[in-house]
Amino acid sequence: MSEKIFVCYPRCTTCKKAEKWLADNGVAVKVRDIKEDNPTEQELRSWREKSGLPLKRFFNTSGQKYREMELKDKLPAMSEDEQYALLATDGMLVKRPILLGDGKVLVGFKEKEWQEVLD
């Protein structure tokens, strides 16, 4: 991976763990605060396509906002376009961290997966 962007929420413990792992492995990243710089609908569509993951994986299902909005019950009835539009409204709804670079997108921190992609 060349220029890498680390999309995170600075107060998230998983993001802190991922950022430390990146530093320990000599991976330089440009940090983007997901709360201050929310991903756009277009970015989310691009990231999903590159990741090959189902759209549901981009939702922060353990987040407070997700629970407050009762999205577990609402998402199945929503169209894909509605889901993208909703994700683009608030970075706290988006699963993090996200690592972007070289046409690859990693969502959520799984050390083994990140290691394989970065090697």
Image (tube, rainbow, N blue to C red):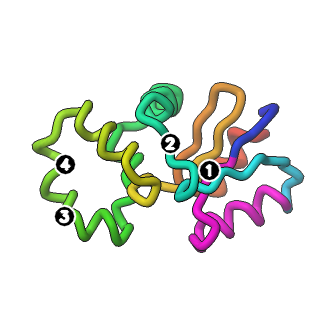
Question: In the picture shown, does residue 22 fall above or below 53?
Answer: below
Question: In the picture shown, does residue 21 fall above or below 89?
Answer: below
Specify which label sits upstream in the sequence, 3 or 1.
1
Residue type, label 2 = Pro
Query: How many residues crowd around disc 4 within 10 Å: few (fewer than 14), some, or many (20 or more)?
Result: some
Q: Are marks 2 and 1 in contact (CB under 8 Å)?
A: yes
Judge depth for marks 2 and 3 and give the one in front.
Answer: 2
- Return the residue at label 2: 39
Asked if residue 79 lies in the magenta stretch, the reply is: no
Specify which label sits upstream in the sequence, 2 or 1.
1
Judge depth for marks 2 and 1 and give the one in front.
Answer: 2
Q: CA distance from mark 2 to mark 3?
A: 21 Å
Please report the residue visible at 67 percent of the width from the left and 48 percent of the height from the top: 114
Q: CA distance from mark 2 to mark 1?
A: 9 Å
Label 2 secondary element: loop
Residue 36 is left or right of residue 88, and the answer is right
- Return the residue at label 3: 70
Q: Quadrant of residue 88?
A: top left
Q: CA distance from mark 3 to mark 1?
A: 25 Å
- Return the residue at label 4: 75
Q: CA distance from mark 3 to mark 4?
A: 9 Å
- Return the residue at label 1: 7
The quarter of the rendered structure image containing the C terminus is top right
